[in-house]
Image: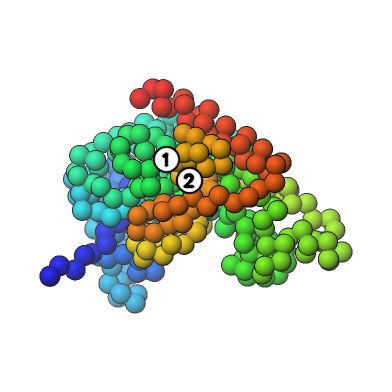
Amino acid sequence: MTINRNKVVIVGAGMVGSSTAFSLVTQGICDEVMIIDINKSKAQGEVMDLCHCVEYLNRNVKVTLGDYTDCGDADIVVITAGAPPKPGQTRIDTLEQSANIVKSIVSPIMESGFSGHFIIVSNPVDMIAHYVYKLSGLPKNQIIGTGTALDSARLKHFIGDLFHVDPRSVQAYTMGEHGDSQMCPWSLVTVGGKRIFDILEDNSEYASVDLEEMIKRVTKVGFEILNVKGSTSYGIASTAAGIIKAILNDENKIIPVSTLLEGEYGENDVFCGVPVILNRSGVKDVVEVHMTKAELAKFKQSADVIRENTMKILEKM
Ligand code: NAD
């Protein structure tokens, strides 16, 4: 009899990769976390530090240093290697550099016999996820960009803060690009089942609330954090860990991630942040929410931004 062990490989031992490893280990989400980085000594240091957590956790998670030949039996490879935007740069400005890094990573991983799920965190995440899809040749359900999952968590935090409720009692997504063009279908946002529009209408104290300003804040807050601490790490690490947990535990949890659209929302050939059902098969299904005409138009604009920029790297393949 064999008992299968879950193995998650993280490529990139920087702020995002090491924080993701810490989230996986402290939450006991998998049996083994393997770390790979071009900077082997940095990866080795993270591995040693993480191994020393185990005594005080509720289970033993094996943490190892690896290389690409070790990916063949991995369930999930998380790509966090990249070039985070420098001050004044947008995520899209890092497209070419990120694409070159990812290209050097995906080929040896596929040569190892890897056939699991890729979770792409490196920015600009929608375009890079599409690139990994093309480079790997794996089925679309196995290529998952973190997309607007983090933005949605940030939005829920802001809404929860506004109404003094737990963010987990808020139902809200941002959709489209993990970037400036993302949008929120406000007509679908509810707090404890009550439409946000009705909450605003029923409570005069919220008369001055500007929902579009809140979306602008969501798109900018990553840069606010980057400017003061040099990186964002805990939010995205929890997001990646949440996605991995949903897959490994076959949760059928709905999370907005970047996935290939083939007809959904009238869009084709674009990786875009939309709510999906996540389970052991990866993206089991795209949830097609009904938006207003104006919301759908905004979503399409965002999909166009992603498609246009994705072409820049796909054309060079
Ligand atoms: P970082 O500079 O701290 O770490 C990047 C790591 O990648 C470094 O350890 C570096 O050695 C490694 N690396 C670079 N080239 C490599 C290669 N060819 N092979 C293996 N490893 C390589 O950066 P960070 O703050 O961890 O950010 C990483 C990426 O995550 C960036 O693209 C950033 O924009 C992105 N990010 C995405 C989100 C999201 O919501 N999707 C949120 C935060 C950050």
How is the structure coloured here? rainbow
User: Three-letter amino acid code at disc 1?
Assistant: Ala
Check disc 1 and report the residue beneath it. 129
Q: Judge whether residue 285 can be spotted in this image.
A: yes
Check disc 2 and report the residue beneath it. 258
Q: Is residue 46 left or right of residue 145?
A: left
Q: Residue at x 27, y 62 (%)?
A: 6
Q: Residue at x 35, y 69 (%)?
A: 28
| Alpha carbon separation for disc pair 1 and 2 | 8 Å
* Quarter in which the N terminus is drawn: bottom left
Q: Judge whether residue 35 can be spotted in this image.
A: no
Asked if the residues shown at circle 1 and circle 2 are in contact, with their CB atoms under 8 angstroms apart, the answer is yes
Q: Residues within 10 Å of mark 2 (few under 14, many from 20)?
A: many
Location of residue 58 (image quadrant)? bottom left
The quadrant where ligand 1 appears is top left
Q: Going from the N terminus, do you reach mark 1 or mark 2 first?
A: 1
Q: Is residue 154 left or right of residue 93?
A: right
